Image (cartoon, grey):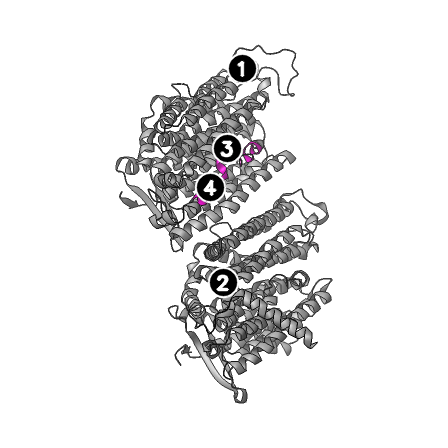
Amino acid sequence: METIVSIKPLLAVLVSTVSAFFIIATRKNPNFREAWSIFAGVLKLVIVLSMIPAVVYDKTIISYSLFTILPGIEIGFKVDAFGLLFAMGASILWIATSFYSIGYMRSTNEHSQTRYFACFAVALSATIGVAFSANLFTMFLFYEVLTIITYPLVAHKGTPEAKAGGRKYAIYLLGAAKAFLIAAIILTYNLTGTLEFSKDGIFPAIVQSVNPELLYIIFVLFLFGFAKSAIMPFHSWLPAAMVAPTPVSALLHAVAVVKTGVFTILRIIFFVFGADLMMDIGVDVFVITFASLTIIAASLIALSRDNLKARLAFSTISQLSYIILGAALLTPSGMVGGIIHITNHAFSKITLFFCAGSIYVSSHKTKVSQLSGIGKKMPWTMAAFAIATLSMIGIPPVSGFITKWYLVIGSLERHSLAVLIVLLVSSFLNAAYFIPILYRAFFKRENSNTEPIDSNDDGNPKENPFLVVPLTLTAIISVLLGLYPDFIVQLAEMVIN
Amino acid sequence: MEDIIINNLDYPVLTVSTFLPLAGALIILFLKRGPFIKWFALATTVATFIVSLPIYKHFDKTTYKMQFVEIHSWIPAWNINYKVGVDGISILFIILVTILSILCVSVSWKAIQIKTKEFYISLLIMETAMIGIFLSLNVFLFYLFWELTLIPMFLLIGVWGGSQRIYAAVKFVLFMLAGSVLMLVGIIVLYYAGGKTFDILELAKVHYPTELQLWLFLAFFAAFAVKMPMFPIHTWLPDAHTEAPTAGSVILAGVLLKMGAYGFLRISFPMFPHAVKVLFIPLLILSVIAIIYGAYVTLMQKDMKRLIAYSSVSHMGFVTLGLFTLNQNGIEGGMLQMINHGVITGALFLCIGMIYERTHSRMIEDYGGLSKSVPVYIVFFTIFTLAAIGLPGMNAFVGEFLIISGAFKANMIIAAFSILGVVLGVCYMVWLYYRIALNEINTTTQASLFDLDSREIATLIPLVVLVLLIGLQPNILLSYMHVSVEHLLEQVHNSVQLESINAYDTINSIAGYIKALFKWV
């Protein structure tokens, strides 16, 4: 494949960091300040979209390198179909989240809004940085930056509970990265002398035959080291991080941060190890086992959660493992299913979180058991919620169905009955924890005896347009992705071919 | 002579760099007390930095040979020359010394109120001694400068130190003397075994019998390991670091600890290669113990300065781990990490010194919420914390990366344990940061806190630049080392082995000597 050198990837990464300085500079004037977020978001999206023709239609790779740290280790960017897919999703959703944040932060009168918007902008830089990384080192750099810069967002509220959540978040993500990733990256470097991603893997044949056990260990270290993917048993930072304001949970803990986790693992599978090597050393079985267990266990836990955001958090854990499971199937359809779920899940899950936030802002309700009859009072919100729910369960025509379809075919291609059963059982469980919410919202009468949640609750919540417009849009995009999946699938096929 | 390049500049650059601070100190001796003295000291350190710059400019990176060499006959009866030179191993320490010395003067500007004249004299003599160590090509001269560091350091701790300063200063000197006495014995034995010369390059060419190598290695090890300090002879360090004034702590952490490692590279490795090869596994194990134990003790500390002091034990464990891997990555990583540690720990000591000047408390519990009360200060502190935990793109990451890479090549299990040290390193730094920067604002110290002034910012900015520069372009430093480290490894690995010996024989033989000793007693 041809490579063209262009500064665009670097610009796409930097634009939001630069905007963070403007956000801080204009902190006295909130309208002006928020305009920078929107402006940078649109600019970022334009830069990302402008790379589509070269990457998708001309099938070239855009690259740009900055510094050489050590021989074989550099800070460099490379835009391929996979990175572009992830970057597009993240930058579109940043714009949606910026609008949503304005509505949410102002109607809840949050403190330190400048810090909030500035950190958010830098977090997006780090996310795009991960998407466009040309090598493991650059990816690790942005991965760590993302962890650090999102800590103030998670602990935003400053309450003891928020601090505890933030602490857990930092300990899990930094700790796993230090404990496992450093070793994995250094061992990879020692064996190959490079950290540059390459199609079909970077391990030379001689290493594969001499030391398969070591490669197995390295992969396991990578799998658990990238703890942002929330694969069990390193998942419990995610529910703890739900103390963050809802837009943070929406963009970061449904899209940017967790998707960074699975994106990095997929990079490792496809571009460091390669499908053939995965198969040869037999580590795919390990991944499938852990991903399957995570899917089922997280779904079961989600069933038992009454707090809406907690239920969504466990749903996220389970859905992320679909992505890893699909990739680890190592069959064409399975891998496509895993890759497209990055986008599909992003749009559906962000809709669900937006809805949870909208419900909270309008009625201060946080629990599933409080939602009786809310469908009539907040029709737009709950309609979007219903659509996203269908996507999570995998019902056509919403995008989640496309994922399930490819995953099921993938399991059949692998002749794996166990994976098929996992997919079917988990779909049933998804329905089991989501359908009751819809039933309660639309069909159950509001219990008139319930205590008002607080003084703001007049029993007659109004939807805030700043919140409703983004969530309606993301719900519509979810449907569109289900009806016209061609573009995404085409990108995914470019990744695996 | 083939392995040296005689100085071809117009003036003796190494001698001038070495003795310019001493000359400054002598002039200060005759100056009247007053604010002029600190300006003069600052000018001297800056001038030293400037006269040393041609060394980096004209340094030839493609050769391992000693460069800018100056030889003058000194005591012909003992075959002692004044011989100085610089190669890829020592050159980076020179710049470290000269930069840190400027910062030390700057940070003492207000902190040192009593006996300022004597303070700056000590500081400048210290600088001469430190540069001298790294430039000496003669064991006798090396030993002279080595001992010369003791006196000014003793004064710096003992006169301008904290409440326990006398205890700390005496402990420091006793530990150092115990080590260097054994080194002196080693030097004398070396003189006779190596053909009656003190020339380091000549001595490195001699093939010593393996058993003699072991004994000599251990004699020099005593001095170097105390300086480093390696576990279990590190106990002087927390006291000395904590009690020393900020400038003293910076010099201790930044340069003094590196003298031991430099000794290994300059003397032990080339002269006693078999001893090193026999003992490298036990030495790696000692290093890992220092890494983990040091980090673990660091976690417990309640005093910020003591916390950073103990973290040095762990960091120097990483340095020795790198050196004793005996491969290119490990040694280069170890050397780079010495520079990094000098920069980061120096910076952290400066940071702590700055708030200590305001509140006169070093206790972690007396602080909290600094991110709200002193935001500019916390920006710097955050950068240095992130650097200390090895964020990629900052300097410590590169050093750790190379060291652990070398360690994995040398021994998988030891390397795996060193990872634990990295994790603990994150724990103590992040926890410290959390407690002082993010926790609730502490009212007892709140009143006396005010943000950094421009002098303090100017002191810290060069270190921030170094942190990022080394993190993103480590080749600027590594390129100086490559050829010299390759040559060093050749000396270690290709040396002619006179008799085969392994670790068990060594231990048996040492046990035999100890038994004989007891019989004799």
Residue A420 visible at all: yes
- The dot on residue A253 is 3
- What is the CA distance from the residue labelled 3 to the residue labelled 1? 25 Å
- The dot on residue A441 is 1
Q: Are marks 3 and 2 on the same chain?
A: no
**On the image, which quarter does residue A368 sit in?**
top right
* Helix, strand or loop: magenta stretch: helix
Assess disc 2: are there few (<14), some (14-19) or many (≥20) residues with their C-alpha within 10 Å of its C-alpha.
Answer: many
Q: Residue A462: x, y in percent?
A: 54, 18
Q: Quick check: A475 above or below B114?
A: above
Work out whether mark 3 precedes mark 4 in sequence or the reverse, and give the earlier one.
4
Q: Residue at x 56, y 74 (%)?
A: B216
**On the image, which quarter does residue A347 sit in?**
top left
Disc 1 marks which amino acid?
Ala
Instruction: List the residue tagged with mark 4.
Output: A220
In depth, the one of A448 and B81 nearer the eye is: B81
Q: Which of label 3 and label 2 is nearer to you?
A: 2
Q: Chain of mark 3?
A: A
Disc 2 marks which amino acid?
Met
Q: Residue A209: x, y in percent?
A: 36, 47
Figure disc tally: 4
Q: Chain of mark 2?
A: B
Instruction: List the residue tagged with mark 2.
Output: B335
Work out whether mark 1 precedes mark 4 in sequence or the reverse, and give the earlier one.
4
Disc 3 marks which amino acid?
His
Badge 2 element: helix
Q: Which of label 4 and label 2 is nearer to you?
A: 4
Q: Which residues are magenta?
A: A216-241
- The reply to whether callout 3 and callout 2 are in contact (CB within 8 Å) is no
Assess disc 1: are there few (<14), some (14-19) or many (≥20) residues with their C-alpha within 10 Å of its C-alpha.
Answer: many
- What is the CA distance from the residue labelled 3 to the residue labelled 4? 23 Å
Please say whether residue A228 is one of the residues in the magenta stretch: yes
